Image: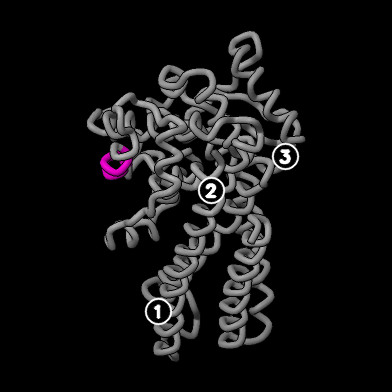
């Protein structure tokens, strides 16, 4: 099933859950209140949509750069955007010490692509271009906007659960405390379920952005090597106090990154098995060998993947191997 169809189905399910919760609250409190909560939900989502890019820019410490400052970076982004058939996004440099790249924006015309200085030093031109192709594909697929909107729903359900269980928000709580507790517990369960659905959507879009990078002309081995190097370098840097502090600060927006930096230490052990010659790259022969292998994850790794914003890196590189 295509990315757009999966995302639309996910949106329909998520907003169906939200509508059901709002209708339930409205029925309990009186039919007139359902409209109020529907408007409130729309305002929450609209507010998130409007301020989301500004928050990402602030937390990621982005500095927008001109063509004079970064001519090669601008050229690569411009060529990839032209191939993808989208307007050229703004180009920025993140001052985070973490090697990574990310894309965000409200619309295609508001698209923004950023890299950190660390990733520019880490990757060669072909590998960096493959990474930028991945980010341009996120913009083309419009998945960043969808995930940003969907992520509001678990936050709203958490707020509802907290309000009904501990906040005493509703006027009927004293006279119908049992109902308030039931609503609060139900909202907490739905918060957990919808959060898992948002994470699932986030993982789906990474596979499609990888494929999009290949469609835009990048070699699978260049993107696979870039991912491998990112994981390896991230695992090394996690011991750095400055990086630890930065990771805590950007925890809420790490879904925008190319990989889940917090899982780098675990993933590097799996990826070392692919790099047979210990060259620090994943070549076409190693990708071809991986394509024929069956990837077996431990039960704990399968469970952990459910709670991450990115797919297991070994599975992800195997997915890339199918395009060789």
Q: Single out the mark in the foreground, 2 or 3.
A: 2
Residue at the spot 65% in from the left edge and 40% down from the top edge? 139
Q: Position of residue 295 (x, y in %)?
A: 37, 53
Give the magenta range.
264-271
Label 1 and label 2: CA atoms lie apart by 34 Å
Answer whether residue 266 is magenta in the image.
yes
Q: Single out the mark in the foreground, 1 or 3.
A: 3
Q: Residues within 10 Å of mark 1 (few under 14, many from 20)?
A: some
Which residue is disc 1 drawn over?
185
Label 2 and label 3: CA atoms lie apart by 20 Å
Pointer 1 with pointer 2, Cβ within 8 A: no
Give the quadrant of the N terminus: bottom right
Q: Quadrant of residue 113?
A: top right
Label 1 and label 3: CA atoms lie apart by 39 Å
Tag 2 secondary structure: helix
Pointer 2 with pointer 3, Cβ within 8 A: no
Q: In this rendering, is residue 123 above or below 89?
A: above
Q: Quadrant of residue 129?
A: top right
Q: What kind of secondary structure does the magenta stretch mostly adopt?
A: helix
Instruction: Judge whether residue 248 can be spotted in this image.
Output: no
Mark 1 or 3 closer to N-term?
A: 3
Q: Which mark is residue 207?
A: 2
Which residue is disc 3 drawn over?
108
Answer whether residue 54 is magenta in the image.
no
Residue at the spot 62% in from the left edge and 57% down from the top edge? 45
Q: Single out the mark in the foreground, 1 or 2.
A: 2
């Amino acid at each position: 099933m295509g990315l757009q169809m999966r995302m639309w189905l996910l949106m329909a399910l998520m907003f169906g859950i939200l509508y059901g919760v709002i209708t339930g609250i409205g029925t309990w409190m009186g039919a007139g209140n359902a409209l109020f909560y529907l408007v409130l939900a729309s305002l929450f989502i609209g507010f998130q949509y409007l301020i989301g890019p500004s928050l990402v820019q602030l937390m990621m410490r982005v500095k927008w750069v001109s063509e004079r400052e970064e001519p090669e970076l601008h050229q690569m982004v411009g060529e990839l955007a032209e191939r993808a058939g989208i307007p050229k996004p703004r180009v920025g440099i993140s001052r985070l010490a973490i090697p990574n790249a990310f894309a965000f924006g409200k619309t295609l015309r508001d698209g923004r692509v950023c890299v950190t200085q660390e990733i520019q030093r880490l990757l060669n031109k072909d590998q960096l271009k493959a990474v930028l192709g991945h980010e341009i594909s996120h913009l083309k697929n419009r998945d960043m906007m969808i995930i940003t909107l969907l992520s509001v729903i678990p936050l709203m359900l958490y707020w509802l659960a907290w309000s009904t269980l501990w906040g005493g928000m509703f006027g009927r709580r004293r006279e119908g405390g049992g109902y308030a507790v039931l609503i609060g517990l139900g909202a907490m369960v739905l918060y957990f379920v919808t959060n898992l659905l948002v994470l699932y959507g986030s993982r789906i879009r990474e596979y499609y952005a990888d494929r999009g990078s290949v469609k835009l002309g990048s070699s699978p081995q260049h993107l696979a090597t870039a991912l491998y190097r990112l994981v390896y370098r991230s695992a090394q840097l996690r011991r750095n106090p400055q990086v630890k502090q930065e990771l805590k600060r950007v925890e809420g927006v790490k879904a925008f990154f190319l990989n889940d930096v917090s899982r780098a230490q675990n993933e590097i052990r799996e990826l070392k098995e692919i790099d047979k010659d210990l060259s620090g790259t994943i070549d076409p022969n190693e990708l071809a060998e991986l394509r024929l292998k069956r990837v077996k994850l431990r039960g704990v790794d399968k469970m952990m993947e459910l709670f991450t914003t990115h797919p297991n890196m070994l599975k992800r590189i195997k997915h890339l191997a199918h395009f060789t």
